[in-house]
Image: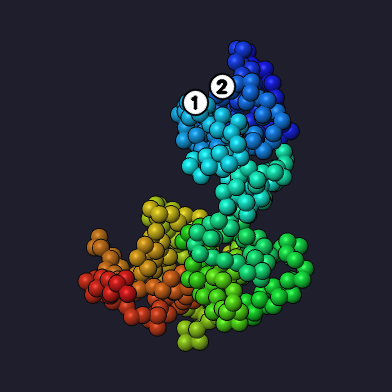
Amino acid sequence: MRDIVFTRRSGWIPNVIREDGELKLMLGAGADANHEPRTFTFPIGEAHLAVIREDLARHLLLWSAVLPLCDAAGTRGRLDEHAAVALLDPVLLSSPADVDALFRRIRWDRSRLVAHGADIDLLERGQVCAAMRMATEGPNEKRAQEYHADRRRAARGVALGPLDTAILRYTSQYLHGATVPKRMPDAVDPALLPQIMRVIATAEQACAGMRIGLDPRRGKRATDKRDWDRMAATVDAAVRAAYPELVDDAVRTVSFLMCAEAADRAKRTPVEDDEEAAGDHADLGESARKTALTFTDDKGGEKKWQRDGPRSASAEFWEFVADRSAGDNEVFTIEDEELGEGIQLHFYADSIARITTVRRGEGGSDPQYRVEYSLVDGIGGYRNLVSAFVRGGCAALEQHGPWMSDVAEFERARRRRDAR
């Protein structure tokens, strides 16, 4: 039978219970293999209960000292009760000087103390008892998160100035640099906002006219990494030149914001009809444009396109790629059966083959094909090649060479490119 003997308003601060007549401290920490919270208990005495009741600071210090033992138990292990019990007298009943000395020797959880109002300067100097004089029962988790973010930056040798800090808060990147940035003007000191906006304006001017396209090879919402890197480098260079006093973290968060916003615009923009936007090649004429195409992949997928349909061939093809592309499905083909020509895209090798029928099979004989290979420069190169083929077939691809019919020659060219 378990009865609650003492609890505080914050549900995560350890409770004192009586179980089968024995006093125990009970706390939740970590998670089991099913991601459910784990609960640990260990015995305490009446003298320990008296201190826990009356002294919030000592209660929190005990919690901070026991949490690493809970972490060590992992998802299935047992709490080291002997080690936990061994902390009771030194933390709860010793002098402040002895408690401070103990915390210099053991592992302890700083975040819990910071969340509950610890004076960070005193905490850093090892004066844990003095740091907890203004402790609060209610936690401020954001304060603890900011403290950890500052410690991570300090470990990298990064010291933020007021404008650096303001920029990170403006982009919502102060706590976690991996989160998607957004503009949060209300999160910064109004006095610094004009300076922040000047930095942002510099970044916007630097990348004006640049865009980040989609990369259907990686799914429907994936963006072109090259476009992203190009925009990030452009913004970084402009901001560093205009504001050399900013630390790298602040500069990177501005370029991250610009890139994330451009990527979001790309994801919300309908797929472009590449061949319609590019227009016809004058030397090919309207009759050269494709009227019917078949799209296939390496897994037996197939899709037909007709010119009188609602969407262009390029848009339909890249949607087919986005739906079907995967790590084990990286070869896609566009075929014009009527004219006996097609292209095969090898995403795994950044290459393409154009295939033309030299002689159709007649009287039971096999058809004869000419296969030529070329290297491709990223998704942008693939888009140009697909658009050119849709507009004018294999003949329109000539200018996008060089094309190599010798497989060994092509492999040597590919290895030279990859080596660079």
As drawn, 58 above or below 320: above
Residue corresponding to mark 2: 43
As drawn, 80 above or below 414: above
Q: Residue furthest bottom?
A: 283
User: Could you say whether the residue bearing mark 1 is in a helix, strand or loop?
Assistant: helix
Residue nearest the observer in this picture, 394 or 115 = 115
Identity of the amino acid at label 1? Glu
Q: Position of residue 77 (x, y in %)?
A: 45, 29
Residue drawn where x is 44% and y is 74% of the image:
381
Q: Residue furthest right?
A: 190
- Residue 184 relative to residue 261: left or right: right
Asked if residue 246 can be seen in this view, the reply is yes
As drawn, 131 above or below 216: above
- Residue 35 relative to residue 333: left or right: right
Residue drawn where x is 66% and y is 50% of the image:
119
Identity of the amino acid at label 2? Pro
Looking at the rendering, which quadrant does residue 213 occupy? bottom right
Residue nearest the observer in this picture, 18 or 332 = 18
| Mark 2 to mark 1 CA distance (whole Å) | 8 Å
In contact (CB < 8 Å): disc 2 and disc 1: yes
Asked if residue 359 can be seen in this view, the reply is no
